[in-house]
Image (cartoon, rainbow, N blue to C red):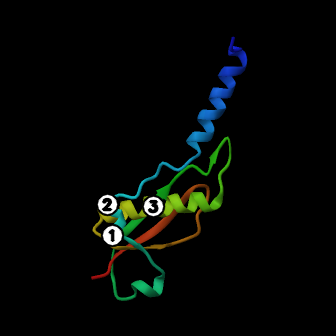
Amino acid sequence: MLNLTLARPAAFIAVLFVSACSFVQLSEAGNQVAQAAAPDVANCTHVGEVQAQTRAKVVVRRGQGKVQEELIVLARNQAALLGANAIVPVAEPAQGMQKFRAYNCD
């Protein structure tokens, strides 16, 4: 017989670890948006700014690489809604947030 006293905390911990996994998906439109550097967009039109946010901590601090990857995906999806096809980070990520400039480079 399963000891429910141990099963409930174990199930809760399992849910927390699964929720720490990335579920951020790049949209079809976001797939058309490239991550660029400032020199790459010198001749492009600035169309706006986007701020991406994800969880930097779920019980334990998440890896910086995973957080950065999710922020870029979220920014690309948001920039696509502005009609942009390139994003450039404005600053380094901090506490699960990062700002980007969105550009249209026709």
Q: Are marks 2 and 1 in contact (CB under 8 Å)?
A: yes
Q: Residue at x 46, y 87 (%)?
A: 39
Location of residue 75 by image quarter: bottom left
Cα separation, mark 1 vs mark 3, equals 11 Å
Residue that numbered label 3 is attached to: 73
Name the N-terminal-most of marks 1 and 3.
Answer: 1
Residue that numbered label 2 is attached to: 28
75 relative to 28 in the view: left or right: right
Q: Please, is residue 4 above or below residue 82 in the view?
A: above
Location of residue 83 by image quarter: bottom left
Cα separation, mark 3 vs mark 2, equals 11 Å
**Residue 32: mark in rendering:** 1
Q: Residue at x 40, y 73 (%)?
A: 34
8 relative to 45 in the view: left or right: right
Cα separation, mark 2 vs mark 1, equals 7 Å
| Residue type pointed to by label 1 | Gln
Question: How far across and how far down the image is residue 64, in percent?
Answer: 64, 60
Q: Are marks 3 and 2 in contact (CB under 8 Å)?
A: no
**Residue 3: mark in rendering:** none
Q: Residue at x 58, y 40 (%)?
A: 18
Question: How far across and how far down the image is residue 19, in percent?
Answer: 56, 41
34 relative to 64 in the view: left or right: left
Screen quadrant of the N terminus: top right
Question: How far across and how far down the image is residue 86, in percent?
Answer: 38, 74
Looking at the image, which is closer to me, 103 or 18? 18
Q: Are marks 1 and 3 in contact (CB under 8 Å)?
A: no
69 relative to 46 in the view: left or right: right
Q: Secondary structure at mark 1?
A: helix
Q: Please, is residue 65 above or below residue 2 in the view?
A: below
| Residue type pointed to by label 2 | Glu
